[in-house]
Amino acid sequence: MAAHLRHAAIFFALLACATQVSCSAEGDEVDISSEGINCEDGLIVPLWPGTDDMSLGDRFGRGLLYSVLMIYLFIGVAIASDKFMESIEMITAQEKEVSVKDPRTGKTQVIIVKVWNETVANLTLMALGSSAPEIMLSVIEIWAKGFHAGDLGPGTIVGSAAFNLFMIIGLCQYVIPDDEVRKIKHLRVFFITATWSVFAYVWLYMILGLFSYGVVEIWEGVLTFLFFPATVYTAFVADRRMFFYKYFDKKYRAKNGVIVQSEKGDIENRATEKFREFEDLDDMDPALAEFERNRREYINAMKRIRLENPNISLIDLETKAREEVMAKGPKSRAYYRAQATRKLAGKEDAMKAMSKTIQAEAEAEKAAMEASAAAELGLNEKKDDGITRVMFDPPHYTVMESVGTFEVTIVREGGDLNSTIQVDYKTEDGSASSDGDYIEAIGTLTFGPGETQKMVTLEVLDDDVFEEDEHFYIRISNLRRKDGKDFSEIDVVDNNGKKTKQPSVQLGTPHMATIMILDDDHGGIFGFEDSEAEIVESVGIYELKVQRISGARGKVAVSYSSEDGTAKAGTHYEAVEGELLFENEETEKIIELPVLDEESYEKSLIMYVNLGEPRQIAEGKEGEGIDYSVLDAKDPEALTEEEKIALLGRPCLGTNGKVQIRIKESKEFKNSVDKMMQKANASMMVGSSSWLEQFTEAFNVQAEDDDEEGEEGEGEEKMPSCGDYIMHFLTLPWKIIFALIPPTGLMDGYPTFIISILFIGLNTAVIGDVAGHLGCYIHLKDSVNAIAFVALGTSVPDTFASKTAAIEDETADASVGNVTGSNAVNVFLGIGIAWTMAAIYWEFQPEGQFVVPVGSLGFSVTVFCIEALLAIAILMARRSPMVGGELGGPKSIKTINSGIFVFFWVFYVLISALEAYKVIDPGF
């Protein structure tokens, strides 16, 4: 029996090795040293008594129990991190107005940008959010051990860095669909953070092995922490192209062995093709460039949606464009990190929640527009205030000189129409005189009961003398009752609500009509209404009116043609050319000009339309034209008086024979883009607005998303499965506890940020105690436990977040670019804060030194740095045309690269564990 137990013990130790729990073996003996194994009470959780006399079964049972407990605690940290990331999204989504000078126009414009720079936010709040468990564990371990050095905190930071750099990037390389690639956009920032991430681990060895062997002094701890703002600042400099960065070439080139590339990648190249009128975004102010880049994304989306659905309403167009841009556009690290654990927190998928919010906003806007339209319609409707009004309808008439007689209309409307009333009318001279241009008309109209319309007949006198167009007037007056009695008075309420007494019958507006007489003894003067016109590109077909004034005799042909200015035919409008044929006494014709709608945000282009010389068409019919070619062939001295008068009436061009047309952007389209830009920086995470909402969400059971259903199941709400209910009840205690955290809608998310950090810290303290006790029960050293298990548990949410980011984003920044920054922040904050606290504490103690055993740090740093440099070199090599990006590519290449990265991590963990258990002696 004893032999069986001995063999079982040997098997368990070897199994621990196989699962990355290191061992030290000599021959057939297993030597599990107690050095580095933590069998002390934790800061919060005391050690389970009886550890000295445990049987193998006890150790196995306790190890299994504590392993399950650690997993459950990691789930709790993940759920708390969801609230933490929501607060970060809310904080970084804050906006401000910035005045910048547009290099294209030289004008200063006010734009809305995020308060937080993207690079600064990634390296501070978001890196802190994803690394919070590791950082808190390191700080809490120092506190729990009475400011003595421990292995669990630093080991977790180093192990997490290795897992992030090798396993996460290796997974992201493989999950990209075959032959698709993702490339890092902010390459300059990646170089900076990658350099700092490698230097961080070299620095650890320098402060322990070179400057003060085995001792950390205050200046070393403080300097370690100060490297954190230095990392942020240098990355910010690279992102904003400050100092020497602005002199770098904008394309790939090798300079002194360093690859330099601007941010202008494939996405910007495609945008530039559509926005050739704009300058290079890299030459703009960074705030303006980012604003312009976002604006172009919305413009392109709106154009594409409009082409697919030409009849879509403007509100629906805005809604679909917002959904598309927010779904396809780059998202923050906080978004993907929170998405990885959102289901555990009992919350709906962020994109679905955002889509519902956008739809709700659209419905509210539609309702508001309908209400406004209804109110406006009510204002425009004629209100019957009880007053009867008599007026001309219409108030303007245009007639030819040869018209003879015609009628003008006088109407009665409103009030009591059953009475009999009379009104006088009389013509008045304008430029036309009653002496020879028209017959004077004077008279009285009588409206009987129920009559609402009366006609007055006027007569125009025709002659054969050429003259300008003329006009005269007709006026109504002396409104009265037929029986001679006064009109009764009624109370009328004006727009201010004031009541006044007014007659029940009045002259309305207009009570005078204008009659324009067009001379028909001249062929006419042809031209446009104005010499300039301004139209919007969304007009479609622009109707350009050509007028014929000062005569309308005969049939006349007028040629026309379009002419390019800054607007080009085929690009901005369709060229037109042809001839207008004016019939006898016809005074207007329309040229239809097709304008191409590019849905530009800004446009101011010029084109022209020219009229040719009018040409009289003789048809041999009396009154329909004269053959001027015959008259032109005659000797002027031989012309008769009638022929000379005829020549004076020949058709000709007026002063507006050429019109300049300025094509501007559609105001509706521009306003829509501006409105969306005001909402563009909104947080992708739909946070909670109240504690009630948070507790309601905690009890919600969310169904697992099934991506394979595609659009077939769109619109149908999927019911939770049995597994969803099991996971819900397992995580319900955590969800209820963390629902106590203030909602993100409170004070822009800052209280949520602070309180969630405290919850994560408390949970991390328990994890540190349980991890130490687990190592005690199964004889696992803290250094190996941290690298193999604790680091794995803290990095699992980041793994799923990076996987989702790699698939959904068009760039590799959120999945790869943030890994190196997070690794540097881990060391500079997690080690810097903890060791600075301990160094200051021991400075005031009798011993006066904070001792940190060097151990195998030199060996671990060497292995990690070699592998890290190889990994970064592989990533850069993948940017060659053969692959085209850090992630994805041909299946064979991405499979090999992913395998190499996984090997890096397995080798690092295995070699570190073997060295920790003295199986190998690296000689450091």
Image (cartoon, rainbow, N blue to C red):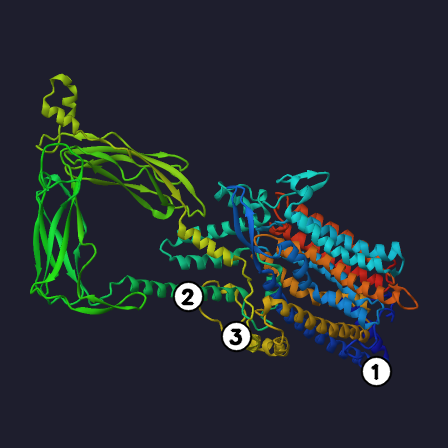
Question: Percent x, y for residue 398?
Answer: 17, 44
Q: Is residue 82 above or below residue 876?
A: below
In the picture of the structure, the residue carrying the numbered disc 1 is 50
Residue at (37, 63) in percent of width and height: 369
Residue nearer the viewer, 562 or 312? 562
- In the picture of the structure, the residue carrying the numbered disc 3 is 720
- Badge 3 crowding class, 10 Å Cα cut-off, few under 14, some 14 to 19, many 20 or more, is few
Q: Position of residue 584 (x, y in %)?
A: 14, 37
Q: Is residue 640 left or right of residue 829?
A: left
Task: Indicate the quadrant containing the N terminus: top left, top right, bottom left or bottom right.
Answer: bottom right
Whether residue 297 is visible to the viewer of this picture, yes or no, is yes
> Gap between marks 3 and 2, in whole Å?
28 Å
Q: Position of residue 713 (x, y in %)?
A: 46, 66
Please rate how many residues cluster around mark 2, counting C-alpha atoms within 10 Å: few if below 14, some from 14 to 19, many from 20: some
- As helix, strand or loop, the secondary structure at mark 1 comes to loop
Residue type marked 3: Pro
Measure the C-alpha gap from mark 2 to mark 1: 66 Å
Q: Quadrant of the C terminus?
A: bottom right
Is residue 521 shown above or below 694? above
Distance Cα–Cα, label 3 vs label 1: 44 Å
Res 320 → quadrant: bottom left
868 left or right of 535 in image:
right
In-front residue for pair 148/706: 148
Identify the mark at residue 363; answer none if there is no mark: 2
